[in-house]
Amino acid sequence: MTGPPARWWRDHPLTGNALFAAALVLMEVAFTLLTPREFWPSRLPLGLAWSVLCATPVALRRVAPWPAVGLAVATLAIPAFLDQAPASQSLTFVVLTYTMAAHRPARPAAVAAVLLWVPVVVANVLAPVESGLQVGPAYLVLNNLLTALLSYAVGRAVQARRVTTEALRERARVAEENQRSLAEQAVADERRRIARELHDVVAHHVSVMGVLATGARRVLRRDPGTADEALATIEDTSRVTLREMRRLLDVLRTDAEPAADLTPQPGLAGIEALVEQVREAGLPVTLHVEGDPGQVEEGVSLTSYRIVQEALTNALKHAGVATAQVRVAVDGGYLTVEVEDTGRGPTPGPDRIGHGLVGMRERVALYGGTLRTGARPGGGFRVSARIPVEPAGTVPA
């Protein structure tokens, strides 16, 4: 049972089980009224009162299980006064046996079953209740033992299922936490990688400014025009460097990082060579360039290259027999990078966390852009990034 009724039953165990006990008594009343009058108790009101007493342990089964077992055994003395066993008494023994088996460990559950049913067997052997059915004590003992075993077995089966369900929920929770940790680790690793690459870009700009400053100082007196051009270049380069430094500080971590790779980082100019490599690997790719990519900053250029590289790599892995198209456009203050393929796209799986897409998203977000990925209408996969391109002379706020 699930939903609001189950929550109410868990939050109000005494009230819920009292209603259950009342239902058992009502069942006995209905059964008594439907039987011929010769089978009714000789004193009907007293019999109904005893029926309520026999059902009382059911109301206590969750809040006080062991006292409920003791009270149920005590009700075995009722037939000595009534000359008839209430039907609610038998149902109470079945319910208590099931409850202890379903909600207690194996040993306490077995002890409870023995405490409940051994007195029943003894009473059936020594003082069997007279009824209209001509059956011997052996039949009564066998019937009670089978009832006890069935109640106990059903309760243990429910207990085993509950334990299995809880174990599966715990495994799902741990797997979800591991998945989240892996995703967070992938983001952190990618951001550190971006920081190292931005370090290379900043170091390159600073080196350029140093060389230009040295050259400007040497020609300042004999060629002021050339020196002025060098100083203007230093001015523009310093603004770009400041922007890259701000982005570097956004992603930089305190962890110790390995030495930065001094190999020049690729950019928009390297996309053509990258496309050629992918063609040689077996994926037909076309490249379209619109606008003037030469005015794009190195950090944005590097980000664009990485997006194309990751998208084409995924196409090689997952697209199958397909073609791809790369579009790079600079227009209206934005750089747009789109990579589309006509293949089947990546197959989703529970262990696939999409590290490549995480890296793309982190890079694009670093420059205030947007990234969209997903299936294309008609089949295939599409990666689209739109990054704002700041004017070369803009001073960062």
Image: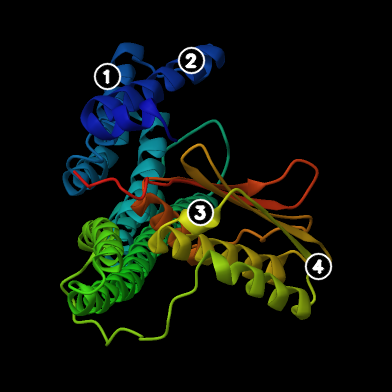
Q: Which residue is mark 3?
A: 150
Q: Which residue is mark 2?
A: 30
The residue mark sitting in front, 1 or 3, is 3
At label 1, which amino acid type do we have? Ala
Q: CA distance from mark 3 to mark 4?
A: 69 Å
Q: Residues within 10 Å of mark 2 (few under 14, many from 20)?
A: few
Report the amino acid beneath label 2: Ala
Mark earlier in primary sequence (3, 4): 3
On the image, numbered disc 1 is attached to which residue? 49
User: Circles 1 and 3: CB distance less than 8 Å?
Assistant: no
Answer whether labels 3 and 4 touch (C-beta < 8 Å): no
Residue 308 left/right relative to 210: right
Q: Secondary structure at mark 3?
A: helix
Determine the CA span between mark 2 and mark 4: 81 Å
Give the CA distance from mark 4 to mark 1: 89 Å
- The quarter in which the C terminus is drawn is top left
Report the residue at 76% width, 58% height from top.
344
Number of labels in the image equals 4
Could you tell me which residue is drawn at 29 percent across and 63 percent down? 225
